[in-house]
Image (spheres, rainbow, N blue to C red):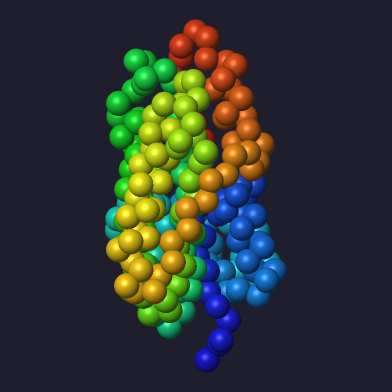
Amino acid sequence: MSTRQSALVTGASRGGLGDALAQELHARGFRVFATARTLSKVQHLKDLGMEVVKMDVADSTSIRNAAAQVASLAGNRLDILINNAGTGYQSTLLDADIETARQLFNVNVFGVLDVTQAFGPLLIASKGIIVNAGSVLGTVPMPFCGVYNASKAALDSLSKQMRIELAPFDIRVIHVWHRRTCDSVRHFLLSALFFAFPFFPCPGKRVG
């Protein structure tokens, strides 16, 4: 039986933070499960020797299927779960489309909870680590990013609650604030600040 530690990264599509994290973990000797909604977007990780899993963090059935697949492959345990998948949205709050805002919260907040619940038994078995990809925008307001900022503030609160509730299982929870990570994120932030006139709601690019 392999003694390699295992890690699962959500939202590992090519060119994003999840992609970089998956490759770094693989380089450090971890058995990496890289997830995405579209497997062709993580084919390059499979070519590098990682295992790829189809999973949509906004779809509970997809999440349960992915958890069952990983449990079967990894012997019912998982050492690290990185909740990286997310999406953005730029608009003034008065102009924000409510359905789009709900979808964003489904991915950025409820998706994290859903994934954590599904993989919880595997993390308990290994006394593992959960890493939630937050943002400094969860605490620092930025014009035209109110819906996204609110989702990251909610995720920060969720991480704190996870830390308390999962401590008895010896599971550590890490909430990471990151700022600029890749061209797509940088473009999203800059466009939110400088190109919001006229006030035109523009959906951001979903990662994972």
Question: Measured from the top left, where is residue 48 in percent x and y?
Answer: 68, 67
Which is nearer the eye, 177 or 106? 177
Question: In front here: 207 or 92?
Answer: 92
Q: Is residue 199 left or right of residue 115?
A: right
Q: Is residue 98 above or below residue 41?
A: above
32 up-or-down from 199: above or below: below
Asked which quadrant contains residue 193, the reply is: top right
Q: Could you tell me if residue 190 is visible in this image?
A: yes
Q: Is residue 96 above or below residue 47?
A: above
**Residue in view at x 46 percent, y 14 percent:** 200
| Residue at (65% x, 75% y) in the render | 29
Q: Could you say which quadrant of the image residue 164 lies in?
A: bottom left
Spot occupied by residue 182 in the image (x, y as percentages of width and height): 65, 41
Q: Position of residue 169 (x, y in %)?
A: 34, 74
Left or right: 193, with 76 as reference point: right
- For the point 47% across and 21% down, which residue is it? 144
Residue 156 image position (x, y, % from top left): 40, 46
Residue 137 sits above or below residue 155 on the image: above
Q: Nearer the viewer, residue 26 or 37?
A: 26
Extreme residue in the top direction: 198
Residue occupying image coordinates x 52% and y 15%: 196
Answer left or right for 166 relative to 40.
Answer: left
Does the image show residue 53? no
